[in-house]
Image: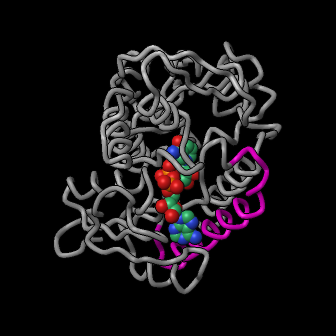
């Protein structure tokens, strides 16, 4: 479908971190883009041609958003946050109700509009906790998902919604795409307030700390993760959507680091020496890394940028936000 002569796309969650970057990329390719979200992007003007402020739990908002047959639909809207939001248990009912309702509504509207292909952003949080107890050897191969045992209700909702999209493929001849994102980070992501993820939280803490001061880390810091830079996430998202593979497939980095190592990398970038103060806090699983074998096989692509490059760009952006907030430079 075209708007004028251009391909059109709908991005649900276009006011969020990944959604706003995705809109920018689609615009750079000449697409006509409609965004939908509860809010505009937090850190820059949206690049979307049309932006609906609305709640996708509301069916009437979904009707307005999906009022035509879009060439591409990206469903990223979710009730979402870092470990401080997902793993405390305090938000479980909201996370499950809100995100499941959004997915049920958006997908069914797309089906009724005869849209064949919706991209859905699942998460590595749906992998079973029992395969992620060894920090040096986690198993996050796509076919390791069952027997299911995610360690959070956020992960369970993702698993349910994955199955929903795939069930519509099976029963309604749709061709939905399911990606499992692994810790996406970069500039213009949430960096404070409780919903930020580890790279942003660490960049903020380092930017705010005095040289030779200290930094608080949740747990012993030996838990492992991998982190994918936003531009590569957007690239993988478009490649999967436009491929003939339905997924689920990991979109993540396989450069695994401990949280302690991540802190050291950010300290090096900042030119600071900080003492690590390990404090109790929500940690999630002991080890997680993206297994990129299926991604390489089916998409002929793998992310290539080393973690440190993305951290440099992210630290520089967060340091600027910290300075703006303080109205003065942190020494
Ligand atoms: P984000 O929180 O920045 O973006 C999600 C957006 O959805 C927000 O702008 C929010 O306002 C919007 N939203 C929430 N409820 C809504 C509603 N009822 N109606 C309309 N909009 C609503 O998160 P993100 O990091 O950009 O993540 C995008 C997607 O990718 C999410 O589905 C998330 O679960 C998934 N994901 C992200 C990561 C990551 O590391 N960022 C990892 C795994 C999966």
The C terminus sits in image quarter: top left
Q: Is residue 72 left or right of residue 262?
A: left
Residue 68 in the magenta stretch? The answer is: no
Residue 75 x, y percent position in the rendering: 50, 60
Q: Position of residue 150 (x, y in %)?
A: 77, 41
Above or below, 318 relative to 267:
below
**Dominant SS type (magenta):** helix
Residue at the limit of the structure toward the bottom, as seen here: 60
Residue nearest the observer in this picture, 122 or 239:
122
The x and y percentages for residue 42 are: 39, 59
Provide the residue span drawn in magenta.
Answer: 86-115
Identity of the residue drawn at 68% across and 22% down: 278
Left-right relation of 23 to 213: left
Whether residue 179 can be seen here: no
Give the residue at x 43% y 44%: 240
Name the residue rendered at 50%, 32% in the picture.
205
- Residue 87 appearing in the image: yes
């Amino acid at each position: 479908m075209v708007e004028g002569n251009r391909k059109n796309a709908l991005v649900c969650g276009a006011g969020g971190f990944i959604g706003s970057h995705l809109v920018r990329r689609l615009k750079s390719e000449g697409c006509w883009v409609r965004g939908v979200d509860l809010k505009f992007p937090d850190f820059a003007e949206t690049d979307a041609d049309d932006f609906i402020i609305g709640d996708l739990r509301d069916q009437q908002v979904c009707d307005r958003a999906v009022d035509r047959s879009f060439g591409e639909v990206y469903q990223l809207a979710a009730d979402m946050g870092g470990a401080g939001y997902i793993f405390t248990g305090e938000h479980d009912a909201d996370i499950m109700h809100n995100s499941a309702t959004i997915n049920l509504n958006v997908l069914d509207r797309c089906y009724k509009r005869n849209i064949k292909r919706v991209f859905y952003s699942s998460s590595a949080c749906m992998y079973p906790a029992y395969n992620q107890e060894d920090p040096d050897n986690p198993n996050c191969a796509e076919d390791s998902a069952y027997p299911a045992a995610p360690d959070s209700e956020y992960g369970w909702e993702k698993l349910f919604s994955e199955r929903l999209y795939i069930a519509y493929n099976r029963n309604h001849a749709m061709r939905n795409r399911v990606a499992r994102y692994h810790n996406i980070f970069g500039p213009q992501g949430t960096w404070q307030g409780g919903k930020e993820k580890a790279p942003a939280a660490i960049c903020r803490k380092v930017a705010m700390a005095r040289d030779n001061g200290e930094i608080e880390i949740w747990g012993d810091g030996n838990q492992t993760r991998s982190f994918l830079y936003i531009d590569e996430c957007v690239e993988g998202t478009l490649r999967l959507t436009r491929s003939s593979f339905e997924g689920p497939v990991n979109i993540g980095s396989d450069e695994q680091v401990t949280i302690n190592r991540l802190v050291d990398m950010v300290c090096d970038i900042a030119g600071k020496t900080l003492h690590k103060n390990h404090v109790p806090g929500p940690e999630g699983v002991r080890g997680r890394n993206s297994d990129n074998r299926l991604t390489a096989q089916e998409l002929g692509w793998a992310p290539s940028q080393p973690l440190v490059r993305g951290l440099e760009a992210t630290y520089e952006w967060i340091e600027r936000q910290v300075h703006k907030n303080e109205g003065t430079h942190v020494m």
